[in-house]
Image: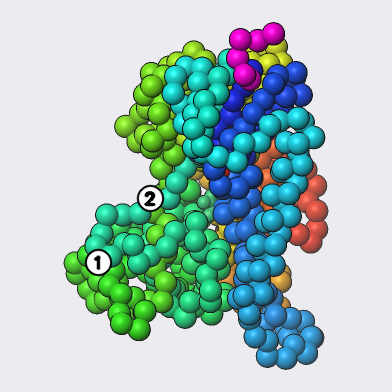
Amino acid sequence: MSDYDFDLFVIGAGSGGVRASRVASAHGAKVAVAEEHRVGGTCVIRGCVPKKLLIYGAHFAEDLKDARRFGWNVPDCDFEWTTLRDNVLADVDRLEGLYRNTLDNHKVELIAERATVTGPHSVKLAGGREISAKYILVATGAWPVVPDVEGAEHGITSNEVFHLDECPGRIVIVGGGYIANEFAGIFHQFGSHVTMVNRGGTLLRGYDESVRDRLLQISMTKGINFRFNAHMEKVEKNEDGTLCVRFKDGDPVPADVVLFATGRRPHTDGLGLEAAGVELDDKGAIKVDEYSRTSCDSIYAVGDVTDRLQLTPVAIREGHAFADTLFGNNPRTVDYGCVPSAVFSHPPLAGVGMTEAQARNTLGTVKIYTSDFRPMKNVLAGREERALYKMVVDATTDRVVGLHMIGPDAPEILQAAAVAVKAGLTKQDFDDTVALHPSMAEELVLLK
Ligand SMILES: Cc1cc2nc3c(=O)[nH]c(=O)nc-3n(C[C@H](O)[C@H](O)[C@H](O)COP(=O)(O)OP(=O)(O)OC[C@H]3O[C@@H](n4cnc5c(N)ncnc54)[C@H](O)[C@@H]3O)c2cc1C
């Protein structure tokens, strides 16, 4: 008999926590997981999944218009936000049920309460119960950051955006990262007047510059407004409930909704980690080694709370590797090289490996191949929008070290191509592959 109530106590039933719980349990551990909100975490409840469903919904705006050029007699169509919202939220409920079943089927005890750490082997539940565990896994994710400006409380974050009562006529989106750009595309397609407000002069830092510039150019052509180098002064609420965003310089912008998409901070506040000597970095992220172990031997952490790469598949891998290492007698680390990522903007963009700038700074000589083309579908639809693919090659070895693209289905195409980049294939290997015609992806093997 163990001296502890559980072999493993997981705090947070999100992407990383659920995977770690069920794998540890399958390895024979006695596991409990505490969740203060809903099972599934950010990705399922208020992140990737509902967002992607809104993206699908948003696409119909252009698809219905384009359909006429393809011979369909499409009448004028109305968009009803509440129908989409309710269907999306119902699907989130369905998925939460599946996640609950997974925990149940793996005999993981789910405790629907907030938990905090009280020592290297102990946690306390919000209801007051103390529980001991041989190991504790912190998988509490991240939380939206709201800038410290007067009236910020009148704005919302991605936590609330899926529940809006109506589609805003005018929305101000503060931020320049992937969440800001995705919601700009979504609301623009739904007919909102969108203004993006950015403190700096760059969108989507970390992505390849050419691809970022193309998104900016297309977004501006579509009619999304941008305020760069903008210093927000305050958000005012008018008597009729509408808002007004004021800046240190420049005209104020009226809005019905202000959405803050200004980053996500590791969710460590008030977790009691200091009671166990768990060290944090200056951003509040839990410091871990390659096996996700913290500065306290019995406490581990995975996912966004460690701020390595804030992506669902990464949190899942970290949770899985942790459980295999501790309970499966199979020490494993996560390989962070060549992790593909996407922005489901309108059009979407995706990338893997080094950007052109990174490669130029890191490697001796670099060869760049690009294809700048108008997808066949856009030509018939009379859309000027062009796609851009870029391949970054190490000129010394011919190895493809980066792929970056913007255009229809870019994330779908890039996921497959990322296998080749991860495997270290060369430009010649791409050239040796016969094109699949007619497709957009064939551009990847036809780059000159
Ligand atoms: C709008 C949005 C869109 C996104 N889109 C994508 C995307 O397209 N692709 C992608 O890969 N990633 C995306 N992400 C990021 C992705 O959601 C996260 O990287 C992922 O969910 C991290 O998983 P996690 O396990 O670390 O944390 P989470 O999934 O956030 O889970 C943490 C859980 O811990 C719970 N919790 C916190 N503190 C406590 C406590 N003290 N006691 C009990 N429970 C607690 C929380 O309620 C939460 O359920 C998106 C995020 C957002 C916000």
Q: Residue at x 60, y 59 (%)?
A: 51
Question: Which residues fall within the magenta stretch?
Answer: 1-6
Q: Residue at x 31, y 62 (%)?
A: 152
In this image, 180 relative to 8: left or right? left
Q: Chief secondary structure of the magenta span?
A: loop
Q: Are marks 2 and 1 in contact (CB under 8 Å)?
A: no
Q: Quadrant of residue 176?
A: bottom left
Q: Which residue is mark 1?
A: 234
Q: Is the C-beta of the residue carrying label 1 under 8 Å from the nearest atom of ligand 1?
A: no
Query: How far from the left and from the top, in percent, is residue 25?
Result: 72, 24
Q: Nearer the viewer, residue 397 or 140?
A: 140
Q: In which of the image's four quarters is ligand 1 placed?
A: top right
Give the quadrant of the N terminus. top right
The answer to whether residue 5 shows anywhere in this view is yes
The answer to whether residue 447 shows anywhere in this view is no
Query: How far from the left and from the top, in percent, is residue 28?
Result: 75, 18
Going by the numbered disc 2, the residue's amino acid type is Val
Query: How far from the left and from the top, in percent, is residue 399?
Result: 61, 33
Q: Is the C-beta of the residue carrying label 2 under 8 Å from the nearest atom of ligand 1?
A: no
In this image, 290 relative to 104: left or right? left
Query: How far from the left and from the top, in percent, is residue 73?
Result: 78, 90
Magenta span contains residue 36:
no
Q: Which residue is mark 2?
A: 145
Going by the numbered disc 1, the residue's amino acid type is Lys
In this image, 434 relative to 420: left or right? right
